[in-house]
Amino acid sequence: MPRLVSHPDEVRVVSKRFGMGAAQIDRYIELGGYESAKKCLAQGPEWIIEEMKASSLRGRGGAGFPTGLKWSFVPKQSAKPKYVLVNGDESEPGTCKDHLIFLHDPHAVIEGTIIAGLAIGAKVGFIYLRGEYRYLLEIMEKAVADAYAKGFLGKNIFGSETEFQVITQSGAGAYEVGEESALMESLEGKRGVPRIKPPFPAVVGLYGGPTVINNAETIATVPHVIAMGGAAFAAIGSARNGGTRLFSISGHVNKPGVYELPMGYNLKKMIYEVAGGVRGGRSLKAVVPGGSSTPVLLPSEIEELGMDFDQVGKAGSMLGSGGVVVIDDQTCIVEFALRTISFYQHESCGWCIPCREGTDWLKKSLTRFHAGFGEAKDIDNIQYLAENMMGRTFCPLGDAAAMPTLGFVKKFRKEFEEHLNGKPCPYAKHVELAVV
Amino acid sequence: MNSETMSIFSPKLSARFDALVEKYPVRRSALVPMLLYAQDEIGYLSDAVIAEVAERIGISELDVRNVATYYSMLRFKPAGKYNVQVCTNISCMLRGAYELYEKFQEELGIGHKGVTDDGMFSLEEVECIGACCWAPAIQVNYEFHDELTPDHVPGILKSYRGAGWAEGNGKHA
């Protein structure tokens, strides 16, 4: 069972039922569960969307798009059925928050899905979990069955005339499926290759119908927004960044874990106070702020940095999925860059040439470089390759591979130079390559 | 093929499949999970499994293969009864995943995607499994093991080896 952590600075909204047995439906109800769905059923779609807009909740998958606005894009009238699709394909390295949501609070996901369905006028919601999360899928499936048994799902939810069905789905191993259009392809029984946009999913999505796709954390947050009111939720966070967020803090810290902190919480404090500082009394070399695809930050860049979408964006990186990966001074950045690009090379679906070829050549270059066979011009070449991937692919995977690479090369050029002229890696640890 | 008389699926898997295809607006939405469930029971996606899934969904075998080859958890040859998957992605790497992976290689005498002679274990280096805050982490079939050091390796292997031939164990395999 994954370890739960706590810190006095935490504001428990989404995680408030963690460790309280809320996977059992009666316990969930006892803790106030499904009241928000009932309220939404009574209030109607326009009210729901207004509350969501007032909350300034932004998508927790990484892009940070305002949830209320996203829901408002779905046409009211549609010849084809509309759908809600919950993205639980959590695969961004450094991110494990949805893992805990599915484990401790599966009904919050179901309740959020119902509310999203009510808001857009959908009768079916899909909850897609990555294939590796089998034990969590079983927890979700039981929760869905229990919700049907109580009449919270089905033809007449909560005794009303409204229908809402929930279908759970397992993936089978693919990072790319976390991208919304690839996720729809996978759910339609195809390879997870992204679709060309526009049309956007809100207009033409799953099975060709208008579809709202939200990250599992976003959806699990929805019932809390309704319960406390959009304005109250917004007040917890920073400007245009409502509420709290589950930060997965991993790597070289004394107390790694998933902590729920207000949006805009200072990153330095997050590392040194919440997560107990860098382990072994070492010093901080760098931090990846929002999952492996977000550009690395230096210690000097985090002093005053508030962790919300806008502030991290201004600092030249992204808040992404909230996966904070802490790197100490004994770590080889070239190796870290190599391991990162190896991942993207493995996960590229191969559809767009700049991504397929770019990730492959970056992996080859960095492999050679880390092994001590690099040349000075390779450093510029790595940067050139990455720059030419940016913005040239259908989905963000190409950017996700290029952005961190550019960050490593630009901010740690000296460390790349230290690997030149046949010199062994100054950190000389894992010369074995990632062969996944 | 008449899937009722010649099915290689167990009655339980057949029933699961029949229920699954009915859930969706289109039958082939069942394809990805179904391939995984069939693999769980039969061990890998043999030609016979692919043929039966194609037949049941009503698409060509080529179409099934085209989809199946995309997903990293799906395999086309047998793995061990217990498939040890060591995550070496960044969060795990920073906390000693490669040392852990080396220890598994040493103890099992196999490398990436290798299978032990007795068919009991296979080993894989895998990408992020969503256990970054409890790193380094592994999965044995679908079971997670968190916060490991190389010292844990012999004990983990022993626990599966001990359970290996007992009736009712390894139900995830």
Image: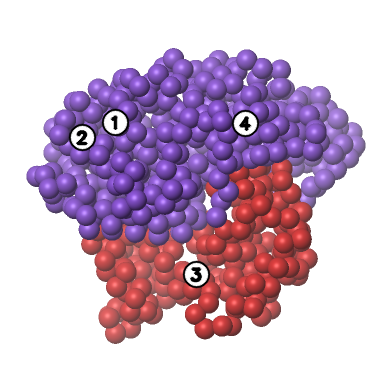
Q: Spot the red chain and give its letter.
A: B
Colour for chain A in the figure: purple
Other residues around mark 2 within 10 Å, as few (<14) / some (14–19) / many (≥20): some
Query: Marks 3/4: CA distance?
Result: 37 Å
Q: Quick one: B10 or B166, which is closer to the camera?
A: B166
Residue shown at 62%/64% (left/top)? B84
Report the residue marked by disc 2: A39
Q: Where residue A419 appears, x then y in whole percent? A: 84, 34
Say whether disc 1 or disc 4 marks the residue closer to the N-terminus.
Answer: 1
Q: Is residue A14 left or right of residue A373?
A: left
Q: Amino acid at mark 1?
A: Ile
User: Which residue is disc 3 drawn over?
Assistant: B172
Q: Is residue A138 something one can see in this rendering?
A: yes
- Residue B124, percent from left and from top: 64, 60
Q: Amino acid at mark 2?
A: Lys
Which residue is tagged 4? Answer: A274
Location of mark 1 (residue): A226
Q: Amino acid at mark 4?
A: Val
Query: Are dots 1 and 3 on a single chain?
Result: no
